[in-house]
Image (cartoon, helix red, strand yellow):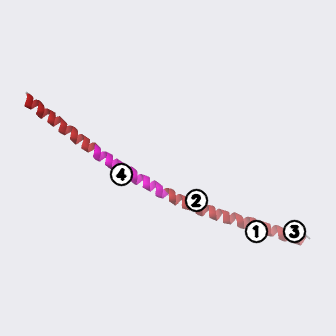
Amino acid sequence: MSDIFVQAMIYMCATFILGGVLGWAIWGFGSAKRLSSMASEVNFWKENCEQSRFQRDNELRKIELLEDERKQLKQKLAAARG
C-alpha cells in the first residue's frame, strides 16, 4: 500500500512541476509577444507625434509669413492713402 502511495505522490509532484513549468513558459512567451506589440505601438505613436509636430511647425511658419505679408500690405495701403 505504501508503494502505491509513494508512486502516486511522485506522479502528482511531477505533474505539478511540469504544469508549473509549462504555465511559466506560456506566460513568458505571452508577455514577450505583448511587449513587442507595445513596442510597435509606441513607435507608431512616436512617429505620429513627430509628424504632427512637423506639420504644426509648417503651419506656424505659414502663419508668420501671412502676418508679415499683411503688415506690408497695410503699410502700402497707408502710404497710398497719405
N-terminal label among 4 and 1: 1
- The CA distance from mark 2 to mark 1 is 26 Å
In percent of width and height, residue 20 lies at 70, 63
Q: Which residues are magenta?
A: 39-59
In percent of width and height, residue 8 lies at 83, 69
Q: Residues within 10 Å of mark 3 (few under 14, many from 20)?
A: few
Give the mark toward the camera: 3 or 2.
2
Residue occupying image coordinates x 41% and y 52%: 46
Inspect the image, locate mark 1, and give the three-letter code of the amino acid beneath it: Ala
Q: Which residue is mark 2?
A: 31
Question: Picture quarter containing residue 33?
Answer: bottom right
**Helix, strand or loop for disc 2:** helix
Give the mark toward the camera: 4 or 1.
4
Mark number, residue 51: 4
**Helix, strand or loop for disc 4:** helix
Mark number, residue 5: 3
Inspect the image, locate mark 2, and give the three-letter code of the amino acid beneath it: Ser
Give the mark toward the camera: 2 or 4.
4
**Helix, strand or loop for disc 1:** helix
**Helix, strand or loop for disc 3:** helix
- The CA distance from mark 2 to mark 4 is 30 Å
Q: Which residue is mark 1?
A: 14
- Residue 55 within the segment the image draws in magenta: yes
Instruction: Report the side of 48 relative to 70 (left or right).
Output: right
